[in-house]
Amino acid sequence: MAAAVPLLSPPILSRSTTASASASPSPKFTFPVVPSRTPSRPIFTTTRLNVSSPANKPPVSTSSKPTAAQKKQPTEEVIYFDGGAHYGDLAANLLLGFTLFWLPLTLAAVSRAFNLRYRFTNLRVTVISGLTGQDRSDFSYKVIKDVQVVPRFIGEWGDVIITLRDGTKVDLRSVPKFREIAKYCLSMVEQPSAAELKESRPKGF
């Protein structure tokens, strides 16, 4: 008859099984190794570019010397004459203004003396008129075609008649030093065949 085995007793292991169990190491947890992301070359690199100019392109001059065209252009405006009508025109017309026949000419002389101004520079001719100088006309010497003068009284003052290329005539009345101013205008005209100064006979006082 077989021997009875207790139900609650642990099973009896053999010596070989016990020795193998004691010889096996305890289990360990291992973590994966993440490789480093260090770049193999630096992030900021300096690239040197060699640019060569075309062979057929002339080198750019860095000289600060002005060219011949720049020398011809004036850098600033210089005034040659700036003034109004000759005072003798006003005085003579006031003396003759007592007659009704000469009164309109006297009023015109008064208006010229107080409301008219001429300006001649190295760039242009300016005529300023009006009570406050609001009426202004400017034109360059390049548009002048001809210049004529008309002496008044005994030649102390006179009119300068400027003819433009489009046919417009600008009549400057009672200009002091009118001959010198007319010659200056002709010298500033950029025309090789500029007409000489023409002097006409006076048609009035």
Image: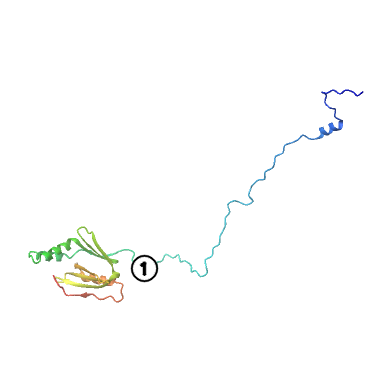
Task: Please give the count of numbered marks on the rendered protein.
Answer: 1
Judge whether 203 appears above or below 2 on screen: below
Amino acid type indicated by mark 1:
Lys
The answer to which image quadrant residue 125 occupies is: bottom left
User: Of residues 42 and 104, which is closer to you in this image?
Assistant: 104
Q: Residue furthest right?
A: 1
Instruction: Kindly identify which residue carries mark 1.
Output: 71
- At x 19% / y 61%, what residue is drawn? 115
Instruction: Give the image location of residue 190, x and y in percent.
Output: 31, 72
Instruction: Give the image location of residue 72, x and y in percent.
Output: 35, 69
- At x 24% / y 62%, what residue is drawn? 136
Is 21 placed left or right of 124 in the picture? Answer: right
Is 83 placed left or right of 66 in the picture? Answer: left
Instruction: Give the image location of residue 144, x and y in percent.
Output: 27, 71
- At x 27% / y 66%, what residue is drawn? 139
Judge whether 7 appears above or below 190 on screen: above
Judge whether 37 appears above or below 119 on screen: above
User: Of residues 91 and 129, which is closer to you in this image?
Assistant: 129
Quadrant of the snapshot with the C terminus: bottom left
Is 55 placed left or right of 117 in the picture? Answer: right
Judge whether 76 appears above or below 8 on screen: below
User: Of residues 119 and 12, which is closer to you in this image?
Assistant: 12
Is 148 placed left or right of 68 in the picture? Answer: left
